[in-house]
């Protein structure tokens, strides 16, 4: 896609969705890409790490269930319950 086409696409999107910024558009696209991931091998193709997924959740772009599904693939220890010394 050349620059003129990209600028036209962004202009069209801003008409349809007032307040849309390139940052929000990129985050939305990333969230939809994450929803399509079915394995950790899918995830490693995207420019993400746990902090990015946390930011998307904190901004309301990922719900808790989707965040947990992604984190289980990317960093299982971050969502697994911890077991204390008593084994509980």
Image (cartoon, rainbow, N blue to C red):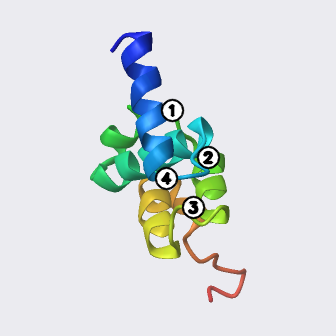
**Residue at 43%, 51% in the rendered image:** 16
* Vertical arrangement, residue 81 with respect to residue 49, above or below: below
- Mark 4 element type: loop
Q: Earlier in the sequence, mark 1 or mark 3?
A: 1
Q: Which residue is mark 2?
A: 52
Q: Position of residue 5 (x, y in %)?
A: 36, 18
Q: Which residue is mark 4?
A: 17
Q: Earlier in the sequence, mark 3 or mark 2?
A: 2
Q: Earlier in the sequence, mark 1 or mark 4?
A: 4
Camera-side mark, 1 or 3: 1
Q: Which residue is mark 3?
A: 77
Q: Position of residue 43 (x, y in %)?
A: 39, 42
Tell me the quadrant of the picture where the N terminus can be found.
Answer: top left
Q: Are marks 1 and 2 in contact (CB under 8 Å)?
A: yes
Q: Does residue 30 appear in the picture of this structure?
A: no
Local crowd size for mark 2, using a 10 Å CA cut-off: few (<14), some (14–19), many (≥20):
few
Q: Earlier in the sequence, mark 3 or mark 4?
A: 4
Local crowd size for mark 3, using a 10 Å CA cut-off: few (<14), some (14–19), many (≥20):
few
User: Real-space Cα distance between discs 3 and 2?
Assistant: 17 Å
* Vertical arrangement, residue 47 with respect to residue 70, above or below: above
User: Real-space Cα distance between discs 1 and 2?
Assistant: 9 Å
Q: Are marks 3 and 4 in contact (CB under 8 Å)?
A: no
Tell me where residue 87 sits by quadrant: bottom right
Q: Which residue is mark 1?
A: 47
Camera-side residue: 8 or 37? 8
């Amino acid at each position: 896609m050349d620059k003129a086409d990209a600028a036209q696409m962004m202009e069209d999107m801003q008409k349809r969705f007032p307040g849309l910024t390139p940052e929000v558009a990129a985050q939305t696209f990333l969230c939809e890409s994450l929803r399509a991931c079915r394995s950790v091998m899918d995830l490693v193709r995207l420019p993400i790490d746990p902090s990015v997924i946390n930011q998307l959740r904190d901004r309301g772009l990922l719900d808790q269930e989707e965040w947990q599904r992604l984190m289980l693939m990317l960093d299982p220890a971050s969502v697994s319950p911890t077991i204390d010394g008593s084994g509980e």
